[in-house]
Image (spheres, grey):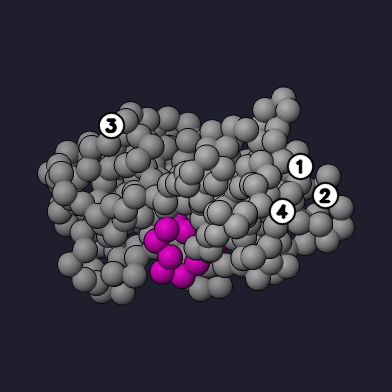
Amino acid sequence: MSRHSLITLITDFDTTDHFVGTMKGVILNINPDVQIVDICHKVASYDIFDAAFTLAQSYRFFPPDTIHLVVVDPGVGTVRRPLLVRTMAYKFVAPDNGVLSLIYEREERAEVRHITADHYFLNPVSNTFQGRDVFAPVVGWLSKGVEVDKFGDPITEYTKFASPKPKRVGDSLIKGVALRIDKFGNIITNLTPEDVPQLFAENPPPFKIMINEQEITRLNLAYSMGKPSEVFAIVGSSGYIEICTNRGSAAKILNVNRGVEVGVVLGNPAPATPDSV
């Protein structure tokens, strides 16, 4: 068995075309012993943040030395660079478009290299399918044990974005945002229990979660604890607070898309008085 024996794939290719299968063929032609795991091929088309979020939620659950390949690449065929990133436990191969931003945030040490050793690529390199011609062969050779320094030099400037952070407004309001709508219609916010610890105290104060002019006032432990058609909050497996409903789509009920503001109001704000108006 080769030294690096596990590769994961995240793409926006879906599985209705040949793209994913072709990339696997390239990898297996280089290293027939490698194991390939599909994390997700239904990332929203061209959606770099969706891919970054998918990677951030999954990469740590794989064994050390796993190679994670992400191909969500709206800039394919342009001057954007292919990157190889090494952290303490993993390697990542992806386009330099910000798709690894949450890895840069979460990992204490990340060595970023610009992949320039084109003798590892397929020839000729397509301007429209570099997942096949550039990224797949690179991870194939990585899985065979080729050292990272053979692929290119380290760089210090690369594309990255900062994930949205909750903001406290006064003593009683925390503002967040809807990060993602999952397949079930659950609204995943960027709020965590650490942002609103009062909700998880032994005697929590009254609260309401405001989203799209709707109020949610119930926090459950599991999806099935909600009443039919009731919209409530839980802490999901991602560690974020989610807005959901039992066996239904909270996003449809509330008419919410990603990016909508979410506010948590703690306590019962005092009503306005003539002096405060």
Would you place residue 19 above or below residue 179 in this image? below
The mark nearer the N terminus, 3 or 4, is 3
Q: Which residues are magenta?
A: 41-51
* Front of the two marks 4 and 1: 4
Provide residue 166's location: percent of width, then percent of height: 47, 46
Farthest residue in the front direction? 275
- Local packing at callout 1 (Cα closer than 10 Å; few below 14, some 14-19, many 20+) is few
Asked if marks 2 and 4 touch (Cβ < 8 Å), the reply is no
- Local packing at callout 2 (Cα closer than 10 Å; few below 14, some 14-19, many 20+) is many
In the image, residue 23 sits, relative to residue 77, either above or below, namely above
Whole-number angstrom distance, CA of label 2 to CA of label 4: 12 Å
Tell me what residue is drawn at x 56 percent, y 43 percent.
172
Q: Position of residue 214 (x, y in %)?
A: 68, 62
Q: Is residue 124 left or right of residue 93?
A: left
Residue at image mark 2: 226
Q: Nearer the viewer, residue 144 or 117?
A: 117
Label 4, on which residue?
216
User: For mark 3, what is the residue?
Assistant: 109
> 253 or 101: which is nearer to us?
253
Which of discs 3 and 4 lies nearer the camera? The answer is 4
